[in-house]
Image (cartoon, grey):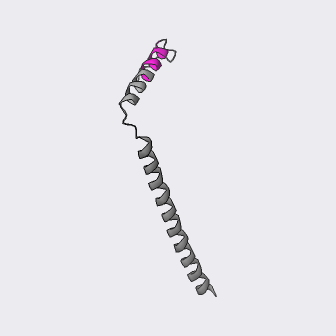
Amino acid sequence: MATQTNTNNPGKTQDMGKFFRGVKTELKKVNWPTRKDLINYTTVVLVTCAIASVGVWIADTIFGKTLQLIIK
């Protein structure tokens, strides 16, 4: 049989404070990208998305035209 815990734990706010202090400590350890790196990464993502979009558009056009020829 499982034991029941008190949901009105008075130490709950202390636990939340400890949690957010831990989060703050961990965020200080993160190796954040520089502005130049961030711009480069964003450019790579946008160019890749554009190339993929053009590829899907070309494939859709080819399949659409092929389907129209088959249906007629």
- Horizontally, residue 6 falls left or right of residue 1, namely right
Above or below, 41 relative to 68: above
Q: Which quadrant of the view contains residue 4?
A: top left
> Which residues are the magenta region?
8-19
Asked if the stretch drawn in magenta spans residue 30, the answer is no
Locate the N terminus by quadrant.
top left
Q: Residue at x 40, y 37 (%)?
A: 32
Residue at the far bottom in the pictured view: 72
> Magenta part mainly helix, strand or loop?
helix
Residue 1 appears anywhere in the view? no
Q: Nearer the viewer, residue 38 or 29?
A: 38
Q: Could you tell me residue 9's position as x and y percent?
A: 48, 14
Total marks placed: 0
Q: Residue at x 60, y 86 (%)?
A: 69
Above or below, 46 relative to 68: above
Q: Residue at x 42, y 25 (%)?
A: 24
Q: Could you tell me residue 21's position as x and y percent?
A: 42, 21
Residue 32 appears anywhere in the view? yes
Above or below, 40 relative to 66: above
Q: Could you tell me residue 62's position as x and y percent?
A: 54, 78
Residue at the far top in the pictured view: 10
Q: Residue at x 35, y 30 (%)?
A: 29
